[in-house]
Image: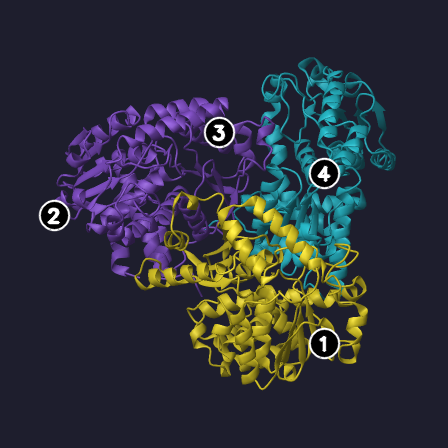
Chain colours: A cyan, B yellow, C purple
């Protein structure tokens, strides 16, 4: 354990105004103040240091951490499970197929029923445009009401594990990776980050990663460029947010339809596929209508459309255009690697291989980001609590 | 934490004769003495108070709590998980689809194989008339034998999470709700409770809730009325038990084929759909025979039959007939609410809305009822153990 | 708790050279030295004694134990869950259907992604000849690299829960059963063990149990006889290993195509069905090719072939041929019992009934074997740690 670094982090946390995190949820990063964002990042890093030093940051003797996955997941599932376990909670998955929710139960009722002894609820709901966030908001509001009226003895901390708008646990992990890679949050100022679309032979990938990325990275004084082919727009609200944050932090925001232009002199590149906005909208309609034939046709059309932009690949040539030819490559994983996971994909295998370990490191922060979100919702004075751990040194492994 | 109330509960527990609960199972409420029933209710309430006071009633450092769900479940699943976790056990589900049980393994063998380090087993098996309880009994007897012969180092406490005869964790939760709502078990004496059938567009709902309700509520001196349309009889044995208990507790038991009559002057109403007994019997046969076509026809017939009694709905008009027009409405949830979860259902939405919070409160007792059942099977002197918690104040959330 | 026996076990452990277990995996028993094997057996027995004496051998405050089951399982699943829980770990299953692994993710990537806070990974992968062990080796090597390069803060202990070559947790449990049944490891010397094929109406049973059995039991000075009909050979490598070990331990190794011959004067019999080697090879090809029709035909052919050897059943007559007519009967369960789980099976019901409890006892060791494997990978000085438990007596149930 790097105790000096840990003390530096705790000292930083003690100076930030983050009292609104206590009792709160984490749904969209742009609803949080800069101080709150920084508090989550520093707390995540502190929890990582504590565990590395064999200090257990457990704050619960018992309690459930419920997970609701409306889409497949490996790394987020394990990150959530790890975070819950680290704090002393047991994961209980709400598998909507095994439940009675189909029998006409309301969101309001289910929320209450799963929360009597529950400290945290993590939800992934990213399949429908205009729905994931609304659902989470409905759960959050309902639980706040239940807590206020005394129906449940604690308000579970709701954590957005990916919705239609944002993927905050991912992007916060990406950001913590950037901070540690560049040696401090102050060093992000003036860096140029390129969030770009990339070709993939798969279909229907959510828009929440690019949306979340531009909306968060714009807060640290980084010049943000979004690049995508025509028709691959993001939800407009998120671009407005990103542009506003850039302005506030004294940086620039721009959009281009050229991957080359975005990579030019970039310090950081995040080439990643997503579905065209209009396709996601049609898909939402077809999924709701249960129109399987329509979905098959839409998938075919979409893949055809994607193919027009097969040259949107993160190649060695493109990487050479970045700052000193050595921009930091980011990816939320799994990446579509050309010649490895598909014939043509998001990234050339030699590029990916060079950054492989760094992308794994990037992913390694996610459990601690989630743990920090729960910890901060449950801990009134986080700096003092973290200091207690250092003083009392409860062991994680005996 | 209300320490005075907690001490009153513990004092009550210390005066009851409940030694047979130690090492035992909880399969059917009517197999338990009145003292034992009261001990479970008071212990559940005490555990709820302890947790509310941030005292952890954990009694295990490790151990499994196995669950076997042969029917879908949300609230019972979460209640069981919460109860196990509160006491320090980890839930391990026996998913019969992922197991090798199909390969000719006997109940006796499986019971032993899942029990080597297991402290509790919760089973839901309510699909077949004449089967759920028999299966649980077979598991319980087998485990008792294994424990006696030294094959397993502890006898897991078996908890009936719903069978064909009874749903004790539900009805005990309902009862604890009644006790706290009316200000004490002594206040239940003389209350009139109407357990009535209600219309639902769904099919095949188990009989265990009404059966369990009349068999348990009859023990507290409440006048019990069972109401249902012709052909919707319960398993006869359970009505005999209820009538006997009413007689013993100085109350009356009656049956009627009129919902209005049952609601007349009722203090408590429990309008809830269930399948006709003869349909459940036929269904058991068809399910066993794997006769899918027969099942579809039976469902159609049954839904047609139900439709004849669509006027069996808990409406505002009916509620007006109850004592002072304000009987307490009970439901095990989810309810079929007219205009909300279906076109015509068990209850009018305005009635349900008025009692919504109270039904959620009713549900909130279930985790503690289950925890109490396990706790009492594992604790020789429950009053002393509960006092220890108050003295030592182990924290639930640090 | 038998403290004298416990001290004898710990004393034994302290004298064995087992330092290579620390930080290691348990994939194949024949990769381990005799001292290491004995250390696992004695540690498993010590953990069982500790728990029986209500001492908790927990060594973790938090941490995940990941399980990956590529084949159905009841007893191994529960054994793994029990072992993990006993040591303080939470089980998190990697359900490959719910994950994004299908999206082209590599073994290397998944291994890292599930391991950031993971202390153990148990894998069952026994469906494909030439694959299960290779997969586990790939995971193990990848994690060793990730740990060395600092990507993960601890190396998860990999435990083979059954592969195409070996089933070490099963066979180690069988062996511990033998040691305790015969009153000490020294008493196994000179015992005659018959590992024989037996008829079963089922199909495609893995070869890992017989392979693992002959490869391990040959190390204790037992005379090993393998018996099977023509065409039911094991993977040759495992027979070579068994024969070599027999030679080293001063015992004999033989193979026969007669069940009678193998049973003659045997002290221990292990009659158990497995698929013909050539069928397993063809099946591997068909499964990979997704050739469902071919699989159906192969199953038909295989069952036809099996039928030729329906007389390979462990009957009372055969049992009479064993030493004093009372050899110890072993089975990994569930057994195909004639007249119980099938018309004609591996064993007569009267034979099985006589040994039923002993086979359950045999199974009871598996959770402790798995716990010992994880414990030894995580504990530098196991004897000292076990002594600490005796001194500090942390309670398992309060």
Q: Nearer the viewer, mark 3 or mark 2?
A: 2
Residue ID for mark 2: C324
Q: Are marks 1 and 3 on the same chain?
A: no
Residue ID for mark 3: C142
Asked if residue C313 shows in the view, the reply is yes
Residue ID for mark 1: B261
Task: State which quadrant residue B3 falls in.
Answer: bottom right
Q: Between marks 3 and 2, how big is the CA–CA gap?
A: 51 Å
Q: Residues within 10 Å of mark 4 (few under 14, many from 20)?
A: many
Q: Between marks 1 and 4, how big is the CA–CA gap?
A: 51 Å
Q: Are marks 1 and 4 on the same chain?
A: no
Number of the label disc, if any, that sits on residue A126: 4
Q: Is residue C34 above or below residue A377?
A: above
Q: Nearer the viewer, mark 4 or mark 3?
A: 4
Q: Nearer the viewer, mark 1 or mark 3?
A: 1
Q: Is residue C376 left or right of residue B67?
A: left
Residue at left offset 76%, top offset 77%: B322
Q: Residue furthest top?
A: A317
Q: Between marks 1 and 3, how big is the CA–CA gap?
A: 73 Å
Circle 2/circle 1 CB separation < 8 Å: no
Circle 1/circle 4 CB separation < 8 Å: no
The percent coordinates of residue B124 (x first, y second) are 53, 57
The secondary element bearing badge 1 is classed as helix
Q: Are marks 2 and 1 on the same chain?
A: no
């Amino acid at each position: 354990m790097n105790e000096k670094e840990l003390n530096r982090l705790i000292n930083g946390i003690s100076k930030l105004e983050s009292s609104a995190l206590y009792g709160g949820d984490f749904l969209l990063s742009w609803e949080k103040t800069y101080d709150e964002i920084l508090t989550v990042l520093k707390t995540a890093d502190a929890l990582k240091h504590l565990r590395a030093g064999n200090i257990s940051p457990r704050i619960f003797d018992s309690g459930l951490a419920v997970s609701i996955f409306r889409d497949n997941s490996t790394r987020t599932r394990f990150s959530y499970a790890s975070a819950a376990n680290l704090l002393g909670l047991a994961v209980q998955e709400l598998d909507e197929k095994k439940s009675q929710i189909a029998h006409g139960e309301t969101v309001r009722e289910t929320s209450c029923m799963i929360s009597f002894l529950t400290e945290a609820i993590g939800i992934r709901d990213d399949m429908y445009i205009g729905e994931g966030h609304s659902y989470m908001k409905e759960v959050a509001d309902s639980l706040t009401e239940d807590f206020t009226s005394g129906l449940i003895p604690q308000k579970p901390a709701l954590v957005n594990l990916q919705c239609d708008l944002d993927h905050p646990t991912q992007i916060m992990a990406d950001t913590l990776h950037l901070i540690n890679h560049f040696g401090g949050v102050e060093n992000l100022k003036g860096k140029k980050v390129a969030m770009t679309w990339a070709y993939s032979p798969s279909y229907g990938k959510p828009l929440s990663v690019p949306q979340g990325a531009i909306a968060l990275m714009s807060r640290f004084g980084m010049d943000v460029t979004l690049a995508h082919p025509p028709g691959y727009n993001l939800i407009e609200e998120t671009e407005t947010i990103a542009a506003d944050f850039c302005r506030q932090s004294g940086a620039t925001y721009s959009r281009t339809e050229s991957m080359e232009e975005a990579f030019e002199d970039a310090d950081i590149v995040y080439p990643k596929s997503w579905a065209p906005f209009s396709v996601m909208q049609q898909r939402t309609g077809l999924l709701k209508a249960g129109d399987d034939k329509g979905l098959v046709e839409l998938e075919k059309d979409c893949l055809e459309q994607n193919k027009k932009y097969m040259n949107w690949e993160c190649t060695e040539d493109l990487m050479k255009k970045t700052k000193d030819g050595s921009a930091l490559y980011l990816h939320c994983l799994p990446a579509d690697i050309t010649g490895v996971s598909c014939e043509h994909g998001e990234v050339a295998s030699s590029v990916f291989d060079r950054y492989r370990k760094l992308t794994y490191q990037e992913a390694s922060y996610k459990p601690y980001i989630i743990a920090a979100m729960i910890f901060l919702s449950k801990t009134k004075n986080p700096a003092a609590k973290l200091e207690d751990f250092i003083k009392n040194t409860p062991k994680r492994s005996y």
